[in-house]
């Protein structure tokens, strides 16, 4: 937040009531699109209108730990440099990234991912208040989906109070949690008048550059300098539980997938209205 040192992360947890939700494994990043397939299309996009990063307060809806660094890490670092107030809504704790774990080891993973996030923000120079909702990872599909979205609505609504811009996943990003976050953010922003700007994570993996489903007619790109690029990559490197092989298994997010977030630009979908 404003007035803090680079990398400061203020955290608070919110208790959100839920009924049973089940985990659904997202698309496989090993067999998805290569980043180079998108290069020409991304380069052809218009640049994001000023001011960018937004002057704030900015609310970021992050379905899982690391999503905010992957999709908008440079934007958040730049906003922090400018002294903007940043509130990151950590929707889940990402505890199902390794579904084979026992309950005890999954609890350890939750703690580890929290520690990784603190380090990621420090390395990227992101100053933010991070509010944990701790909704079930993968809970936006199955029998508990409606309860999950209701819980997110209850948790997100007060955090949007006073915000000027909300960054949230595109509603068709492809992972159930991401899509639900996008729907809830879109609904609340429509009600409150907060400017909604959507970002992409899984879309890069499954969509077809030759005939994309992503609405590039309302897409823009944010080009950033070497400093922001290096800080973003340093932040991503902190998520060792996700980017390195462990327990004889491949990395959750292999290098092929991470390449989508190693370009010196971030892509956003504008919903209309001024950015501030």
Image (tube, rainbow, N blue to C red):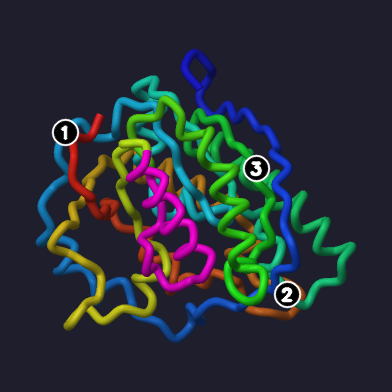
Q: Secondary structure at mark 1?
A: loop
Which of discs 2 and 3 lies nearer the camera? The answer is 3
- Name the image quarter holding residue 101: bottom right
Could you tell which of marks 1 and 2 lies nearer the N-terminus?
1
Q: Residues within 10 Å of mark 3 (few under 14, many from 20)?
A: many
Q: Residue furthest bottom?
A: 31
Which numbered circle lies on residue 87? none
Give the extent of the magenta segment: 167-191
Q: Residue at x 26, y 40 (%)?
A: 225
Residue located farthest toward the front when viewing the structure as drawn? 191
Dominant SS of magenta comes to: helix
In three-dimensional space, the C-alpha distance between marks 2 and 3, rounded to whole angstroms, equals 21 Å
Residue 174 shown left or right of residue 193 in the figure: right
Left or right: residue 222 versus residue 59 is left
Badge 3 is on which residue? 132
Residue to which mark 1 is pinned: 50
Residue drawn at (14%, 69%), measured in percent from left and top? 40
Residue 182 covered by magenta stretch:
yes
Badge 2, how many Cα within 10 Å: few under 14, some, many 20+?
few
- Residue 158: say if magenta: no
Please identify, in this view, whether the residue under mark 1 or under mark 3 is nearer the observer: 3
Nearest the viewer among 237 and 219 is 219
> Hey, which quadrant is residue 93 in on the image?
bottom right
Indicate the position of residue 269 as horizontal and vertical percent values: 25, 55
Q: Nearer the viewer, residue 239 or 10?
A: 10
What residue sits right under mark 2 in the picture? 99
């Amino acid at each position: 937040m404003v007035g803090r040192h680079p990398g400061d992360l203020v955290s608070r947890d919110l208790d959100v009531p839920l009924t049973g939700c089940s985990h659904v494994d997202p698309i496989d990043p090993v067999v998805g699109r290569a980043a180079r397939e998108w290069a020409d299309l991304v380069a052809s996009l218009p640049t994001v209108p000023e001011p960018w990063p937004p002057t704030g307060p900015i609310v970021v809806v992050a379905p899982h730990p690391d999503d905010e660094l992957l999709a908008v890490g440079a934007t958040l670092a730049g906003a922090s440099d400018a002294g903007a107030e940043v509130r990151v809504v950590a929707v889940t704790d990402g505890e199902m990234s390794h579904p084979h774990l026992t309950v005890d080891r999954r609890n350890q993973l939750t703690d580890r991912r929290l520690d990784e996030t603190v380090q990621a923000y420090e390395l990227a120079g992101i100053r933010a208040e991070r509010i944990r909702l701790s909704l079930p990872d993968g809970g936006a599909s199955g029998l508990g989906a409606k309860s999950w979205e209701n819980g997110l609505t209850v948790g997100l609504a007060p955090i949007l109070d006073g915000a000027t811009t909300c960054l949230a996943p595109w509603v068709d990003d492809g992972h159930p949690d991401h899509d639900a976050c996008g729907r809830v953010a879109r609904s609340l922003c429509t009600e409150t008048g907060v400017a909604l700007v959507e970002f992409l994570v899984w879309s890069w993996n499954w969509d077809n550059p030759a005939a994309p489903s992503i609405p590039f007619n309302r897409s823009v790109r944010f080009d950033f300098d070497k400093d922001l690029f290096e800080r973003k990559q340093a932040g991503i490197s902190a998520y060792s539980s996700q980017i390195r092989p462990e327990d004889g298994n491949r990395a959750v997010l292999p290098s092929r997938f991470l390449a989508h977030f190693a370009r010196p630009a971030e892509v956003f979908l504008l919903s209309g209205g001024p950015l501030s």
